[in-house]
Image (tube, helix red, strand yellow):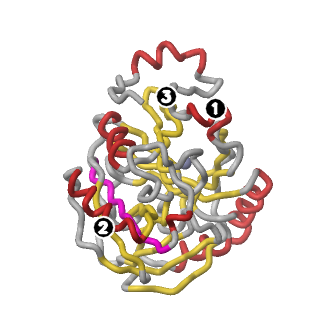
Amino acid sequence: MHGIHHVTAIAGSPNANLKFYTRGLGLRLVKKTVNFDDPGTYHFYFGDERGSPGTILTFFPWEHAAPGHNGVGLTQTTAFRVPLESFEFWVRRLNELGVKHDAPVERFGDKVLTFRDPDGMSLALVGVAGAEAEDSWSNGPIVAEHAIRGFHGVTLKLEEAAPTGAILTDVLGFENRGHDEGHVRFKAQSTIGGIVDIHVARENLAGRMGRGSVHHVAFRAKDDAEQRQMVKKLVVDHRLAATEQKDRNYFRSVYFREPGGILFEIATDEPGFAVDEPLEKLGTDLKLPAFLEPRRKELEEVLPHLELAR
Ligand code: ZN
């Protein structure tokens, strides 16, 4: 199954981030760990009950990160699926939370509500008919009927669609599905996280990565063998280099810069988030990879205190 595996973004305050995504949007905190490359910083993973591929939004919260600036060469919007019938519920909920949102628009035939998180990250809710039958995190503050069903997709803001589109179709398992008002749509097999839209914005200024920006978008590979095949296509057919494989404990990853300048990752579906704590306790304790376990005490002292009890 191909599609988006996870989206990783940069936040400011870890407490504000945790509160907004769990209490506000009703996602499950499926893992509380550290940035393996910068272990004095948290790495939060939000998703559905089990953190299924296609539902996972992750953050590096850097309290003093400078604000980012949306523009060409960055991921513009990250969109979640909600049942079409729940669209009005979400408009009311965002109003109650004091979250400013744009007027709903229609894109590719779907109702889209765009809003921003506390760090200015551009998010959207897309009303999808029939999505109520899909899995969600039902034990959170939002009743299952209305809960978010994982990603609808992401929108990338790029100067041209074709070079990035070629990577999406040849390597990452997407198909070109045509365009609507300056957006070219690519669709993968997976219902959850199956869409990448490229917003062609030639005249716009380059974006600047910072607080509220997406750091990278990760795409699914079933396992190491499929990931190796995808990397081979990248190198042989597209002359793009990928990093060596990195073990992220919950999946294994390679990274590459796509032709439009956005950092892409290919992450394996296995082993998933229940590898170091049981499903019912996901996100409860601070989890560290084996190589950082000897530094637990030191890290727990430098990591910011989290106010939100479970
Ligand atoms: Zn990642």
Q: What is the secondary structure assignment of the residue under circle 2?
A: helix
So how many labels did they put on this image? 3
Q: Kindly identify which numbered label has been placed on residue 278.
A: 1
Whether residue 295 sits left or right of residue 236 in the image: it is left
Name, please, the residue furthest toward the right: 225
Q: Position of residue 53 (x, y in %)?
A: 60, 54
Q: What is the secondary structure assignment of the residue under circle 3?
A: strand
Q: What is the secondary structure assignment of the residue under circle 1?
A: loop
Earlier residue among tags 1 and 2: 2
Query: Which residue is painted at 56% across and 31% down in the image?
Result: 281
Q: Position of residue 169 (x, y in %)?
A: 63, 75
Q: Amino acid at mark 2?
A: Glu
Q: Mark 3 CB in 8 Å range of ligand 1?
A: no
Q: Amino acid at mark 1?
A: Pro
Earlier residue among tags 2 and 3: 3
Q: Position of residue 192 (x, y in %)?
A: 56, 63
Query: Which residue is painted at 48% across and 66% down in the image?
Result: 152
Disc 2 or disc 3, which is closer to the eye?
2
- Marks 1/3: CA–CA distance: 23 Å
User: Magenta stretch: residue 155 in it?
Assistant: no
Q: Which residue is mark 3?
A: 39
Q: Mark 1 CB in 8 Å range of ligand 1?
A: no
- Marks 2/3: CA–CA distance: 41 Å
Contact? badges 2 and 3 (CB < 8 Å): no
Residues in magenta, as a range? 119-129
Whether residue 201 sits left or right of residue 83 in the image: it is left
- The quadrant of the rendering that contains the C terminus is top left
Residue 204, compared with residue 267, is above or below; it is below
Query: Which residue is painted at 47% across and 50% down in the image?
Result: 57
